[in-house]
Amino acid sequence: MRSHKHSPSSYARILFRYLGLSEENSQTYFDGTNLSYEELMTLDGTTPRDDMLIVYRNALAIYGREDLGLSVGTQLNLPTHGPLGVAAFSGPDLRTALTLLAKYGQTRVEFFNTSVSENAAGLKISFAETFDLEDLRLFITETVFSGLFSAIDFFIGAGQFKGQVYFSYPKPSYWKKYHNAFGDNIQFNHSATEIIVSSSLLSVPSPTADSELHKQALAICEQQLKEITADEAGTLGLSIEQRVSKLIVENPGRIWTINEVAKKLCMSSRTLIRKLDLEGTQFQIIRDELAKKQVANYLADAGLSVESVGHLMGFNDVSSFRRSFKRWFGETPSEYIARVRGADTSDLRPQH
């Protein structure tokens, strides 16, 4: 299951290649992130949202021009969107494709909440930011719209678009390039960011319609959306500390690192540290308190040796566990057990 607030690494990979980068000259692209070249090239990998935003800023600095989104977005044709792209191009017509892209878009990225409505004039897709895009507003919006127009052109052909395009932000200095990308009917400083596709285009059939393929891809999209919804419901109203605790408690038998937890929670380790600090706690404090409770539970079972408890906690050797135990409890395992059980500790030596 792909966690919400993660994007498929394929998007960062497309951007990487568009910039003409290679492993040898890629350090600037990854600066400030927890990503590596190897992770980026993992075909089924995902990228946490915070890392993705840093990558975008790095890419803009590397590119040296503000209009990067307009050009790299054209690389985002339908097949780059996984099952969602397949569902779109295998469907019966443009109307179906646009509706699916809006409905299931959050299974790919979560920058916008999209809504769809249709009247006699055409089909309108409205884009509302899920969080403040700040300095990346133009880049992300341009990338998304360029990708959307790539999908539209797949159905109707390049340069055949009929409709209106509205942007909620002011006209950028390179605004004339918008007309090359999105046609002549463009307005800036609009009340909302949205696109209206003329009703005359909506029934244009897909050149690659395949009902069986469409059905299969649609089922995958629906399952992914359900997983995201369930994931959001499971953490609704929880603090960051509670989310960290929930993850560790529900996945025992391993020593969680802050990088691993941050990745599971779809943020960078820096962001996790900052958010926990705002809540007045630290990752190690949370992890140690949970470990103490778990160890105490295990040691309540007189049949478990210290070595066995160490293995259950995820330690590879008992000496490492004993050192951690002393740090957690301020005493050795034998001293702790003698105190709480009042028993002979001769049987607490590691079993071989």
Image (cartoon, rainbow, N blue to C red):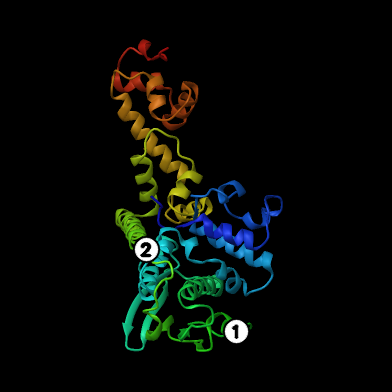
Give the labeled residue for mark 1: 175
Q: Is residue 313 visible?
A: yes
> Mark 2: which amino acid?
Asp
| Residue in view at x 56 percent, y 70 percent | 74
Q: Earlier in the sequence, mark 1 or mark 2?
A: 1
Is the residue marked by circle 1 packed among few (<14), some (14-19), or many (20+) residues within 10 Å? Answer: few
Q: CA distance from mark 1 to mark 2?
A: 39 Å
Image position, residue 277 (x, y; %): 47, 53
Is residue 335 something one can see in this rendering? no
Callout 2: helix, strand or loop? loop
Which x, y percent locates residue 2?
41, 52
Give the residue drawn at x 38%, y 27%: 312
What percent of the width, then of the height, locates residue 129? 43, 72
- Please state which of residues 99 and 7 is positioned toward the viewer in this rendering: 99
According to the image, label 2 marks what residue? Answer: 210
From the viewer's perspective, is 238 left or right of 64?
A: left
Pointer 2 local density, CA inside 10 Å: few below 14, some 14–19, many at least 20: some
**Judging from the image, what secondary structure is the residue with disc 1 in?**
loop
In the orientation shown, which residue stands out farthest toward the top?
346
The amino acid marked with disc number 1 is Trp
Residue 170, quarter of the rendered image: bottom right
Residue 323: percent from the left, percent from the top?
Answer: 49, 26
Identify the residue at horizontal 45%, vertical 35% (top origin).
255
Who is closer to the viewer here, 217 or 49?
217
Q: Are marks 1 and 2 in contact (CB under 8 Å)?
A: no
Q: Is residue 13 above or below residue 286?
A: below
